[in-house]
Amino acid sequence: MSEPEASGKGAVRTALTELLGIRYPVVQAAMGYVSGPRLAAAVSDAGGLGLIASATMSLAELEKAIDDTAGRTPRPFGVNLRADASDAAERVRLIVTRRVPIASFAQAPKPELIAALKDAGVVTIASVGARRHAEKAAGWGIDAVIATGAEGGGHVGAVPTSLLVPQVAAAVDIPVIAAGGFFDGRGLVAALAWGAAGIAMGTRFLLTSDSPVADAVKQVYLAAGLDGTVVTTRVDGVPHRVIRTTMVDRLEGRGRTGGAGRTGGAGRTGGAGGLATLVRSARNAAAFRGLSGMGWREMLRQGREMRRGSGLSWGQVLMAANTPVLLRAAMVDGRTDLGLMSSGQVAGLISDLPSCAELIEAIMAEAATTLDRLEGVRKA
Ligand SMILES: Cc1cc2nc3c(=O)[nH]c(=O)nc-3n(C[C@H](O)[C@H](O)[C@H](O)COP(=O)(O)O)c2cc1C
């Protein structure tokens, strides 16, 4: 990580830019099937930090993605991985041997993986949705945390960004990256004011011209209002914020007339409810298997991995096994009718598809004018 990247004209200095050797305190959050080499490299090349989402890649695909990204940008980028993947140790070895400078964990990290990465000089980042998770990861030696509030896309906790970030920033001594609902320079300044050292954005980077997602899918996000997402537990048993579509409403067991918002129904349902879930899940699994080209055995293997220790019902396990297939149907195959579209509430405030470079420059310019405006308030 070369020093000049983090400094120079227009660069911003925070504990995060110093730690990562990047120009701007803007991170592209990992997004399965979305943040591959093209998007990650575009963000890193624009002075932020791009993260390759590897949970939806095989080891061989990850190796290729790392080489591809390194070929696209000389700047630092990272790999996001799941510590509970059966081949997590091999992925860590790959990150080390390929000299990827940064590794981030989706969900809970493991102390031995953090140690292996740090011993090799890799900077480590953990994703957290609660203060105690940040404290635990900090105790294991993690270098930074991404604190994601409830308005974020994908798997989310219950605490909003405006409360989680100041709480986490006060609790740990390492750089905190604020996530969930960010899209502009005002948000970056707000995050810094809460004690964060930068921001991470998923949905905003999905909605760029550098994102590989099909235009039809991007149009669905652009058309969404602030009430256009819903947190459902019916997909894989844990709260997951997605664009509210007819299919999601069907999973939720209701028509399109109900209001958007957090929904429950994830319990170990028995009786008619449990059977209905199982039948619905099996029907979905059958429908989507063809789209993915994934065999039943692989789908069930993925489901079993998710089930381990999670207390999901069999119906939910089948849905969990479907999750990658459902996400892939939208993000890779462009099937807005069948696929699942993880999205932050912020989709409701986004109406354009800039390049990553244009976006990051606009955010930094707006952050500067916002700081000037606030200075005016102080002087008044
Ligand atoms: C389309 C999409 C896919 C995502 N996939 C993943 C993933 O594979 N792993 C992960 O840890 N988080 C995933 N997330 C969550 C993001 O990393 C991040 O927490 C979230 O996007 C932040 O909120 P925002 O969308 O409001 O910026 C995904 C989010 C989106 C929108």
Image: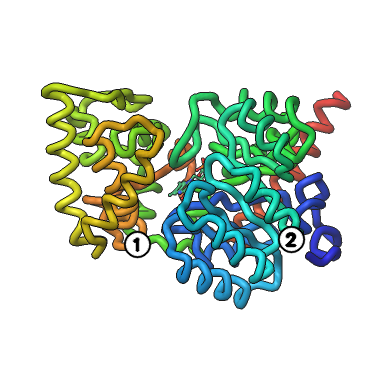
Q: Which quadrant, please, contains the C terminus?
A: top right
Drawn side of residue 84 relative to residue 185, left or right: left
Identify the residue shown where x is 34% and y is 50%.
302
Taking 338 as reference, is 266 above or below it?
A: above
Label 2, label 1: how far apart the Cα atoms are: 34 Å
Q: From where the camera sits, is residue 22 visible?
A: no
Q: Which is nearer the eye, 315 or 366?
A: 315
Q: Residue at point 34% right, 62% down? A: 332
Q: Amino acid at mark 1?
A: Val
Q: Which residue is mark 2?
A: 120
Q: Quadrant of the N terminus?
A: bottom right
User: Residue at coordinates 55% horizontally, 26% vertically from top-left?
Assistant: 160
Tell me what residue is drawn at x 13 percent, y 30 percent: 275
- The answer as to whether callout 2 falls within 8 Å of ligand 1 is no
Q: Nearer the viewer, residue 81 or 155?
A: 81
Of residues 377 and 223, which is closer to you in this image?
223
- Give whichever of discs 2 and 1 has the lower sequence position: 2
Q: Position of residue 306 (x, y in %)?
A: 37, 42
Q: Where 205 falls versus 36 (above or below)?
A: above
Picture quarter containing residue 256? top left
Q: Position of residue 90 (x, y in %)?
A: 55, 62
Q: Quadrant of residue 136?
A: top right
Residue bearing the label numbered 1: 332
Q: Amino acid at mark 2?
A: Ala
The percent coordinates of residue 163 (x first, y second) are 62, 23
